[in-house]
Image (cartoon, rainbow, N blue to C red):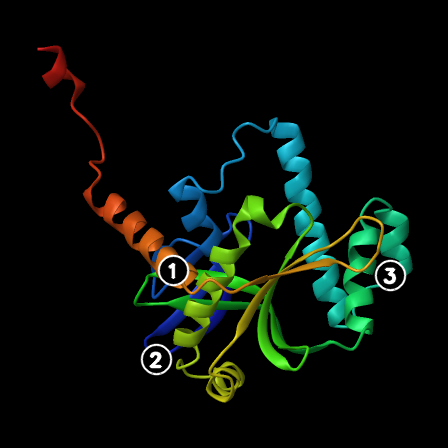
Amino acid sequence: RAIDTEGEGVSLVFEPIAHRYELDGAEVPSVTGVLRASGLIDFSQIPPSILEAARERGTKVHQAIHYWGDGDLNVLEFARDFPDLIGYLESWMRLIDSGRLLTILREYRVASRRHRAAGTLDWLGVFDGHAAIIDFATGDPDDAFKDLQTAGYCILGREWKDEPGEGVLRAFFEHHPFVARYSVRLTKTGSLPKITPYTNPRDFSEFAALVAAQHIVKARKPKAIDWQEYAA
């Protein structure tokens, strides 16, 4: 278990193998989990082998970006070990080298007691002079509904900032009343990524409705149905 935050009445726990979040001892859905449960994110038509390869690609690229940002990645070794993935990392590196981004937080876990959900935002900082949340993608961002994902992370971040020990997050949101949202589609060739802005204010209420619906279904759905009653 990786305990990210723990104190008086505060506990956000992430289990990376199961990709499971616990808030104050109770399991809560992730931002992407909410979208999957709603049926919006649906990869059921994709062969399992292709889907698993895409999942591993996304995980490894995210990890590479994280370690590179920390200065803990040997880029030459990564290129040698993962020649099919190095372009995605170089795509992000080119965007960073452009000077358009000022990083505040990366791979940062946030949660909401009001909505009973949690998640890990990819990037939070200043982009082209204004506050922004960015979510990476190695595939089509529309397939993962990045507009709703980024709205979810913004909702969770604004609430989680008031938790003990969240001074950086608190200062960011208090200093920036408006936070823009973007997806960044990294390219396999290493060229500058495609950046898509999300400006629909309904994204926030729609995400909140989806997570509320998931909790309603979980609370009301029977654990099992007595089939003998229907057979009688």
Please tell me which of labels 3 and 1 falls first in the chain. 3
Q: Which residue is mark 1?
A: 117
Marks 2 and 3, how far apart in space? Answer: 41 Å
Q: Residue furthest front?
A: 200
Q: Which residue is mark 2?
A: 8
* Residue ID at (54%, 54%): 146
In the image, taking residue 211 as reference, residue 77 lies left or right, namely right
**Callout 1–callout 2 Cβ contact below 8 Å:** no
* Residue ID at (34%, 80%): 8
Marks 3 and 1, how far apart in space? Answer: 35 Å
Image location of residue 166, percent across then percent down: 48, 82
* Residue ID at (31%, 48%): 214
Please tell me which of labels 1 and 2 falls first in the chain. 2
Image location of residue 12, percent across then percent down: 43, 67
Q: Where on the picture, by quarter, is residue 121?
A: bottom right
**Other-residue count near label 3 (Cα within 10 Å), few / some / many at <14 / 14–19 / ≥20:** some
Image location of residue 218, percent across then percent down: 27, 45
Q: Which residue is mark 3?
A: 75
**Which label sits on residue 62?**
none
Marks 1 and 2, how far apart in space? Answer: 20 Å
In the image, taking residue 206 as reference, residue 219 lies left or right, namely left
Element on which disc 1 rests: strand
